[in-house]
Image: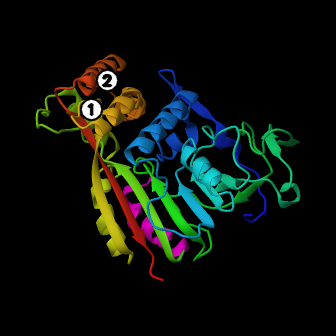
């Protein structure tokens, strides 16, 4: 199991603020790390989004050809659905998930999954490793689940680093590092070092798998213009975060991988349909399943950036989102977000 050296999880990580009915991690907002909500509503959306990814990736969780999977790192695990599924499918593999916030951690996780928060690891000490334990109010309880959502500081914590700081994981450690939709959390200037850190902690011959969405709405038939609400949503969202984040990084992943020395680099752009507009039955089903996710995403991702960073009025924001949602559902616009997948291998 991971190192059992312990320190207390800072209580500040659990403090939330409320903006127009949505909850945000105060620590992330104050430190300009992540501007998305961390409430149950967002956790449910992320779970729905994982179902969409299941469809678009034909139920494949891991793309590179890895024979013996023993250690996996999931960067920016969110609601931890991917990490949970990998741990369940590979019970002999140790899976570690890292995220800035503890709020969306699932209530029940496999025994071979550990979830880290910011620079901390929610971890049962080795003396409890053979028992099922839960953490509540800073106390350890034995019972139905090893790890429940932590709502207060707990002493069962192992210090590591967040994604915007140099990794403290040992070198040559993981068979696979998975990083998905972290562009809204990784600082713009951090990307080259972030990927270099991933390469350092990979075993020789290990793989990195990255997935990012370029949130610039496109149209398969070219009918979407800059006057459309969807395009205005994209422009405003990227403008709200451009001083801190590189939301165009999805299309740059291949170059970042090559610059870091990775080999066998393979990159692909997939159209992520916002509704069921495709003539292809498979893609039409993907668009249909993605429609509810997009409906929520257009509101949840942009609420804080547009109203608090661009100072858009609540009324103007609601109108923009309603119009963008309507256009996302409009089958004649054939709207999609470019979804980039990139894999690469560390030299053996």
Q: In this view, does 56 lie above or below 176?
A: above
Residue 164 visible? no
Q: In which quarter of the image is residue 221?
A: top left
The residue to which callout 1 is attached is 233
Q: Which colour scheme is used?
A: rainbow
Q: In which quarter of the image is residue 216?
A: top left
Question: For the residue carrying disc 1, how many other residues have a C-alpha within 10 Å: few (<14), some (14-19), or many (20+)?
Answer: many
Q: Specify the principal SS of the magenta part.
A: helix
- The image quarter containing residue 322 is top left
Task: Give the percent coordinates (x, y) of residue 38.
Answer: 55, 35
In the image, residue 74 above or below residue 328: below
**Disc count in the image?**
2
Residue at which label 2 appears = 321
Q: Identify the residue at horizontal 53%, vertical 62% (top origin).
A: 165
Residue 198 in the magenta stretch? The answer is yes
Q: What stretch is highlighted in magenta?
A: 186-202
Q: Residue at x 33, y 74 (%)?
A: 259
Residue 173 horizontal side relative to residue 127, left or right: left
* Whether residue 178 is situated above or below residue 332 in the rendered picture: below
Query: Residue at 84% across / 60% down in the picture?
Result: 126
Taking the image as drawn, is residue 100 in sight? yes
The quadrant of the picture occupied by the N terminus is bottom right
Residue closer to the observer: 22 or 327: 327
Residue 60: x %, y % from top left: 46, 52
Badge 2: how crowded within 10 Å, few (<14), some, or many (20+)?
A: many
Q: Do the residues labelled 2 and 1 touch (CB within 8 Å)?
A: yes
Q: Which of marks 2 and 1 is nearer the N terminus?
A: 1
């Amino acid at each position: 199991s991971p190192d059992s050296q312990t320190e207390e999880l800072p209580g500040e990580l659990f403090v939330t603020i409320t903006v127009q009915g949505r909850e945000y991690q105060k620590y992330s907002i104050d430190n300009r790390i992540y501007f998305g909500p961390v409430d149950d509503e967002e956790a449910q959306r992320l779970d729905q989004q994982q179902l969409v990814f299941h469809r678009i990736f034909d139920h494949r969780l891991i793309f590179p050809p890895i024979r013996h999977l023993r250690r996996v790192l999931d960067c920016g695990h969110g609601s931890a659905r991917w990490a949970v599924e990998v741990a369940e499918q590979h019970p002999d593999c140790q899976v570690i998930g890292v995220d800035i916030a503890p709020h969306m951690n699932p209530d029940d996780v496999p025994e071979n999954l550990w979830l880290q928060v910011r620079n901390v690891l929610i971890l049962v000490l080795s003396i409890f490793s053979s028992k099922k334990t839960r953490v509540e109010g800073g106390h350890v309880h034995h019972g139905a689940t090893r790890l429940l959502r932590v709502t207060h500081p707990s002493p069962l914590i192992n210090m590591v680093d967040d994604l915007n700081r140099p990794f403290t994981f040992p070198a040559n450690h993981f068979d696979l590092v998975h990083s998905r939709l972290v562009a809204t959390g990784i600082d713009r200037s951090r990307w080259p070092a972030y990927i270099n850190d991933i390469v350092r902690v990979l075993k020789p011959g290990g793989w990195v798998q990255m997935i990012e969405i370029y949130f610039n709405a496109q149209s398969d038939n070219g009918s979407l213009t800059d006057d459309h609400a969807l395009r205005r949503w994209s422009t405003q969202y990227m403008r709200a975060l451009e001083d801190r984040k590189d939301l165009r990084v999805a299309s740059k992943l291949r170059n970042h991988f090559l610059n870091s020395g990775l080999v066998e680099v393979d990159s692909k752009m997939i159209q992520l349909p916002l509704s069921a507009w495709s003539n292809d039955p498979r893609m039409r089903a993907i668009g249909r399943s993605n429609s509810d996710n997009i409906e929520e995403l257009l509101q949840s991702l942009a609420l804080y950036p547009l109203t608090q960073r661009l100072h858009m009025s609540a009324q103007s924001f609601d109108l923009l989102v309603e119009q963008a949602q309507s256009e996302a559902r409009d089958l004649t616009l054939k709207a999609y977000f470019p979804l980039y997948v990139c894999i690469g291998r560390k030299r053996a």
